[in-house]
Image (spheres, rainbow, N blue to C red):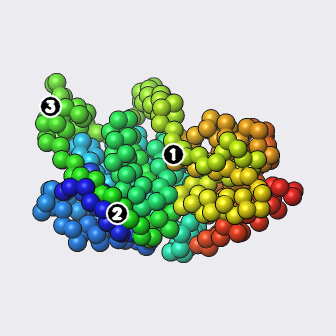
């Protein structure tokens, strides 16, 4: 397939991107607001064109363990779900991280806690960036703000997953999953041959002997000293990711008096709020973390330098604000504005929050 420009939903674009970036297998379970991923894959029938496996599992638990098994063979595999479904996958995600396996996981967030609402949210920030499951592990977390990034982050996500043999989560709010935009789909990336997989993934458990032993994929280690070695190896990897893979976007930061920090589609609403504030003579810049983990701590600190205050805007009760406050070290006032229950703030509301919480405090 050649490059192509289409108008489609974020979830649909993600499914198209999965095929075009050479995904070997998708295992998932329907849940609003991301069900279009599986529905689109079923409609496109990639098993006939590229050989990609698409399977609706009987549950989220089954899906993540199918991903675990597929990743253990060195295949490029993925799943997608929404907030309550991701919670059910957390044990399997912890196993995958401990086993150092490359996987791609899409979370199209909806409101919670519990079953909550099917409306958009950003309340899974802690779950994604602070581990979520048990043990000392990290996911690489990418936060798209457009349908185009829903496409682009599939390729980037697989590249990072295989570079670091680590699971990657695309943390999308329900807005970007459901909204429609023009996107450019990439050319078809050829799927790797079995020989290419063996060269790229010498650790893969494919039934062949590597030296005198067959590779075994497991997260179990009963000897404490060996388990500490494994954990130290993981921590060394995470330090390398923190050093080399921070990503962010800045808008009008240099000449601003105030700063807004937001991720996902909320950053786009903040951009309109920035324009409205400018009409009133208020100079506001925006920094959008693209990698939520690793969090771009140094970039946020630099953007905040010399500012009079910062407003963190999220669709939650205040989660990313903790990382922002750690970044700026009390060098300026940092306040939070968020809406809950699936309610999306307007640009005017954000401007008023900036005035009330920061400028006129």
Q: Residue at x 18, y 43 (%)?
A: 192
Between label 2 and label 1, give the one nearer the viewer.
2
Quick one: label 3 or label 1, which is nearer the N terminus? 3
> Pointer 3: what residue?
209
Give x and y (percent) for residue 262: 61, 54
How far apart are labels 3 and 1 at the CA level? Answer: 37 Å
User: In which quadrant will I find the C terminus?
Assistant: bottom right
**Residue 145 in the image: above or below residue 135:** below
**Residue 134 in the image: above or below residue 276:** above
Q: Residue at x 19, y 38 (%)?
A: 197
Give x and y (percent) for residue 348: 70, 69
> Pointer 1: what residue?
291
How far apart are labels 2 and 1 at the CA level? Answer: 20 Å
Q: Is residue 352 visible?
A: yes
| Res. 55 image quadrant | bottom left
**Residue 323 in the image: above or below residue 151:** above
Quick one: label 2 or label 1, which is nearer the N terminus? 2
What's the mark number on residue 221? none
Quick one: label 3 or label 2, which is nearer the N terminus? 2
Q: Is residue 291 left or right of residue 75?
A: right
What's the mark number on residue 13? 2
Q: Which secondary structure lies at badge 3?
A: strand
User: In which quadrant will I find the N terminus?
Assistant: bottom left
Give x and y (percent) for residue 122: 57, 61
Q: Which secondary structure lies at badge 2?
A: helix
């Amino acid at each position: 397939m050649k490059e192509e420009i289409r108008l489609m939903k974020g979830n649909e674009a993600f499914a198209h991107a999965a095929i075009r970036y050479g995904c070997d297998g998708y295992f998932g379970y329907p849940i609003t607001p991301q069900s279009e991923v599986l529905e689109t894959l079923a409609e496109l029938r990639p098993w006939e064109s590229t050989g990609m496996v698409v399977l609706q599992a009987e549950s989220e638990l089954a899906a993540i363990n199918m991903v675990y098994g597929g990743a253990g063979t060195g295949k490029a595999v993925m799943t997608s779900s929404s907030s309550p479904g991701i919670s059910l996958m957390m044990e399997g995600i912890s196993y995958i991280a401990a086993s150092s396996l490359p996987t791609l996981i899409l979370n199209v967030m909806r409101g919670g806690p519990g079953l909550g609402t099917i409306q958009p949210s950003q309340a899974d920030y802690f779950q994604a960036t602070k581990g979520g499951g048990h043990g000392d592990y990290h996911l690489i977390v990418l936060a798209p703000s457009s349908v185009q990034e829903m496409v682009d982050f599939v390729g980037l996500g697989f590249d990072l997953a295989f570079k670091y043999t680590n699971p990657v989560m695309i943390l999308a709010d329900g807005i970007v999953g459901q909204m429609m935009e023009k996107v450019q789909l990439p050319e078809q990336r050829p799927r790797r041959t079995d020989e290419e997989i063996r060269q790229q993934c010498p650790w893969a458990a494919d039934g062949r002997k590597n030296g005198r032993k067959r590779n075994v994929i497991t997260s179990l280690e009963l000897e404490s000293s060996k388990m500490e070695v494994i954990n130290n190896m993981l921590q060394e990897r995470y330090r390398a990711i923190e050093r080399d893979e921070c990503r962010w976007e800045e808008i009008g930061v240099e000449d601003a008096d105030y700063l807004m920090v937001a991720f996902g589609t909320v950053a786009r609403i903040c951009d309109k709020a920035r324009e409205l504030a400018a009409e009133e003579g208020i100079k506001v810049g925006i920094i959008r973390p693209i990698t939520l983990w690793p969090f771009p701590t140094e970039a946020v600190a630099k953007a905040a330098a010399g500012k009079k205050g910062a407003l963190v805007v999220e669709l939650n009760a205040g989660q990313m604000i903790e990382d922002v406050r750690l970044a700026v070290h009390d060098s300026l006032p940092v306040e939070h504005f968020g809406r809950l229950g699936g309610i999306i703030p307007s640009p005017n509301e954000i401007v008023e929050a900036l005035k009330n919480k920061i400028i006129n405090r």
